[in-house]
Image (cartoon, rainbow, N blue to C red):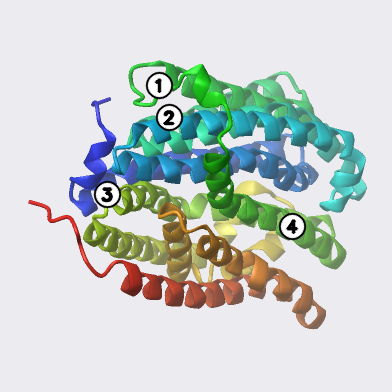
Amino acid sequence: MAKTTSKELGTDSIGRLLVKQAVPASIGILVMSLNILVDTIFVGNWIGSVAIAAINVVLPVSFFIAALGMAIGIGGSSIISRALGAEDSSKALKTFGNQITLTLLLTSIFVVGGLYFIDGIIPSFGGKGAIFEPAKIYYKIVLYGVPFLALSMLGNNVIRAEGKPKFAMVAMIIPSLGNLIFDYLFINVLDYGMEGAAWATSGSYICCFVYILWFFLSKNSELKIKFTHFGLNKNIVTEIASLGGVTLARQAVVSVTYLFLNNILFELGGASSVTVYAIIGRMLMFALFPVLGITQGFLPIAGFNYGAEKYQRVRESINTAIKYAMILGFLIFILIMIFPETITSIFTNDGEVLSKAPGAMRWVFMATPIVVIQLIGSAYFQAIGKATPALLLTLTRQGFFFIPLILILPNFYGELGVWISFPIADTLATIVTGYFLNREIKRTLKVTPTVEA
């Protein structure tokens, strides 16, 4: 890989930078999403459709704990990007050390708590009836690997903050390929069932952690931390917490959403409806990979140039990111509208699921072309270190609109009420985010103090 430095974020053309940052991020997300898709296909065909529902029950809990690493990673990376832009390497190094310490402490506490309260947590997230036992098996084993996933998510975001997207891409590909190989070995060859699926997942997390550890110990990283950097600094921890809290709040709301949706769908349509949502959830991760890649690529560009006070470049990065993402969002929308039956049939041959999923999938993806504004808009406030608006805008989509809608609309429209809540919430959140993003641009990005040659 060619040697790159963070300074390129402030000098290269925005279009080129966005492609350079977004393509590796998109590929990494694509491979990770394909891994989740294929993993679901393997589990559905080699273990059964109930196993898909069981994994879907466990995901919000394990992902919430892992999201501690992601939250600390994104929050600290915002500080690191701006510090590198302002040429303050001391703050960047101290921030990275504090990120590692926080991640180790918090994930350890949550894993212990998650294992202790296992019998209460699983039913709360929809793991009832035939779903409970396979969910419990999967949950216990996966939780052992979650700290490695949290550290990997932390490291991945810091790698992006350094302006090294190709290494971040590899870090996302390794666990994906590892999981597929382990899936085949543990489930199909050794016939370990749900235990095999769980060990495959945990093993892939460990593989990713080993690669990221190598990156920071090698010459590829600019951040060479020392033992003294691990000591917690109150100001840095506060800033990490305020910015990382945005990501953590988002994942907390996602977990609560899973809790409500799994229980509501189980009551309305049984295990088959929970499976439908599991399939659609996987497709949301997979289909939106290029949009999420652009959002990931946009973050270090906006953060670095904001820290360097190159405001015209910040404006250009916002406009370019939204334009590219909307084009891709529209293409995704067209494909989902045309092929939902084909997509569903890849996952399962369960007749009840096949009859429900296509219509539900169309509703869920209805607002895809415009929701990109909400994703990039909320990400922008996080990139520039404005935690409060970033938090509020992040919560608008699922917290302020979606959860109330799924609690109200099913009372009038049954299961359809769940599915139509998706595009309504997406549209409302996009309108709100667009308004505040436009206002922020007019207020803070009026001039360009630094004149570029």
What amino acid type should be assigned to the residue bearing mark 3?
A: Ala
Q: Is residue 21 left or right of residue 260?
A: left
Question: In this rendering, is residue 214 above or below 83?
Answer: above
Q: On the image, numbered disc 4 is attached to which residue?
A: 256
The local secondary structure at tag 2 comes to helix
- Is the residue under label 3 in contact with that under label 2 (CB below 8 Å)? no
What amino acid type should be assigned to the residue bearing mark 2?
A: Leu
**Residue 335 x/y as whole percent:** 45, 62
At horizontal 22% and vertical 61% (from top left) the residue drawn is 312
- Is the residue under label 4 in contact with that under label 1 (CB below 8 Å)? no
Q: Nearer the viewer, residue 168 or 6?
A: 6
- Is the residue under label 2 in contact with that under label 1 (CB below 8 Å)? yes
Q: On the image, numbered disc 1 is attached to which residue?
A: 224
**Residue 132 x/y as whole percent:** 88, 43
Q: On the image, numbered disc 2 is attached to which residue?
A: 93
Question: In this rendering, is residue 438 above or below 123?
Answer: below
Q: Is residue 243 left or right of residue 299?
A: right
Say whether residue 2 is visible.
yes
